[in-house]
Amino acid sequence: MWYLRHVNKVRLSLNLKLSVRYNHVHLKENIKRQQISKVLIANRGEIACRVMRTAKKLGIRTVAVYSDADKNAMHVEMADEAYHIGPPPSAQSYLNAAKILDVAKKSNSQAIHPGYGFLSENVEFCEKCTNEGVIFIGPPPSAIRDMGIKSTSKAIMSSAGVPIVRGYHGEDQSIERLQAEAQKVGFPLMIKAVRGGGGKGMRIAMTEEEFLPQLESAKRESLKSFGDDNMLLEQYITDPRHVEVQVFADMHGNVVHLFERDCSVQRRHQKIIEEAPAPGLSEDTRKAIGEAAVRAARAVGYVGAGTVEFILHRITHEFHFMEMNTRLQVEHPITEMITGTDLVEWQLRVASGEPLPLSQQEMVRRGHAVECRIYAEEPGAGFLPRAGTLHRLRQPTPEDNVRIETGVREGQEVSVHYDPMIAKLVVWGRDRNEALAKTRAKLSEYQVAGLETNVNFLLRLSAASAFVFGDVHTAFIPQHEAELFADPDEHLANLRSIHAALGLLLNSQRNDSVTKNWKGISVESASWRPNYQLKKTILLKFNDKDIKITVEYDSAPNSYKVQVNDGQWQQVEALLRNTELGLQLTTRIGDVTSNVGLLTYADELHVYDENGQSVHRIPRPKYQTGSDEDVSSSQNSACSPTPGVMERILVAKGDKVVKGQPLFVVIAMKMEYVVRSPRDGVIAEIATVKQGDAVGKGAQIVLLEADS
């Protein structure tokens, strides 16, 4: 594949190029080239694994750090050394700068790679590394400070000739001043944490009435995530595109951009699918936005990998500076795919004092790349994150054009304490259409059980007509909600129910395993018994609907007549096989043959096909489920929508509340969820939980007095 060949070519010529440039520019006397032979990765999950792969390729030893929750994690297993740094909460482990620096010195690590998130944009940590003689693989503290404080960065960008959005970026953070400035800017209004990023500490106030509640919520979340609750206010540009530029700079004054990425389609202000290059831009616009990003980097004396983010008007393609992320981005692999580079290798070389491997003139963009973030979350419930055990995790096989960036394996846990990302699927194609087609094909290969994921949603999103056309923007998901959250059509729903029922039936008979041959396929199967009961009725639930599937055994082996509810009978040939990938069901209905994956898990039947995953539930008898009485009616109680940690309870027993009034706040995976009263009423009971206590999904926290 092109980008791999290009990486090898660049790598083979790298030493010669660096030697030539070294002699040509006579490196500045104050730049000391330092050999990095051991690096500590101050992070976890897929990014820690990603950094380790490149470090090992370069012969650099790796040191991992881990919390109690991560003692068996993949990044711990991959590292040459691993050190425990504390309990699961980030503040006591991955944000414990003193502990991490102590591990760096104890392990004789010359450098720390912060990954993204956690301490990656913490200026105090960067300064401590410098003071302790440890290389911080990132920009200098001054650049992090200037770009991390959004009000400062806006002023610097304006002076550098980079377009900015109008708003309030002042130091006076009194509620009265913020409210007055909000009225000046006008509504709708964006409220953003000064030190924010990743969608945290960000709220939109559509009206003046919404401003104070949204401001308070943003402040709380920002304080929790960044230890700072200062805010800036900006005009909210309705439905813009989010286009960002990858920049890279060295210690010798060289700055380049590696083209742009489009990250417009988001939920909760966080990206879920990214692509490079951005679709539909003219070459003039690409050139202008790339040059603006380089000016931004030069303006703060930048060194290392960074991303300059812009808001881009959907129609005119005018762009305005939004922020600069002074670290490696989650979506950096798509830039690597279209440029044939390894950005982590660049980071390590630049941090050692080497000049950039390529100049702007040598940079080549080729093909199109797409990244999908696979999350443990429930799209149909507002993309609420989920935590728990991955009882099944089968991912696509990596290929030349396909990368799977992950930090978890089957049987491991997605923790309530951290981001719910399971993996990143990264695909390259010769053009956008090919890249999207490959993306959909690879998404359909995911098989997950134990936690709900967004894989089905990503399949629908990547196939949505407007997305395929390239009409992307930040309001894409709510604007296309009907298409993206639609139930499967009746034909597909019935086919999946047939597969689930036959899979359940045939799997239950596997104890009498005999070898059968069907249409030339030799298999181990117990799917047919002579003189077996001629008719079976199977009851399932699918999308909260009761489904009745009736199966009649035919006289021929592996042949059945099947009826869904009271519909027409269909002739079906079916075989169940045990493969390396698990149970595989092959069916033939008419002239259509289907191969689907199957998994039985608890009282669920999972069917994996080209349209994603469907889950059928096997109804349990009433004697197993207990009373029919609904003691936790949603109209009488308020429950935690997700596993998380109790942040605040806002009411007391006996309080009168009105519908929609906030009752309590739960923090889950660094996001804040405010739970509101389902109706007017009086608080009857409050669960015995306090701030910092763990709560499970569905845990009843507040009970209202019975409605008289």
Image (cartoon, helix red, strand yellow):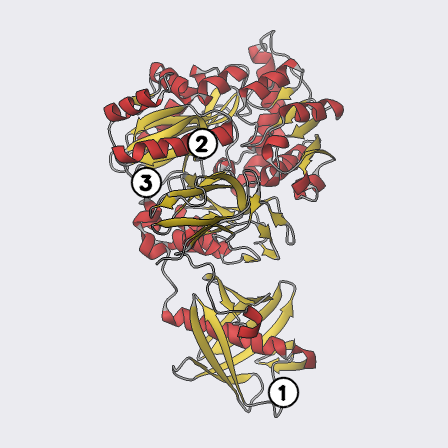
Which one is in front in this view, the residue at disc 2 or the one at disc 1?
A: 2
Near mark 3 (Cα within 10 A), the count class, few <14, some 14-19 or many ≥20, is: few
Q: Is residue 189 visible?
A: yes
Q: Amino acid at mark 3?
A: Gly
Residue at x 36% of width, y 45% of height: 657
C-alpha span from label 2 to label 1: 64 Å
Which of the pair 625/78 is nearer the observer? 625
Residue at x 34% of width, y 23% of height: 175
How far across and down, in percent of the image, does residue 4 sit? 56, 40
What residue would you read off at disc 2?
A: 220
Which one is in front in this view, the residue at disc 2 or the one at disc 3?
A: 2
Q: Amino acid at mark 2?
A: Arg
The image quarter in which residue 31 lies: top right
Which of the pair 97/369 is nearer the observer? 97
In this rendering, position of residue 291 left or right of residue 122: left
Q: Is residue 437 visible?
A: no
C-alpha span from label 2 to label 3: 38 Å
What residue would you read off at disc 1?
A: 529
C-alpha span from label 1 to label 3: 59 Å
Q: Is residue 261 above or below residue 513?
A: above
What residue would you read off at disc 3?
A: 280
Residue at x 55% of width, y 27% of height: 120
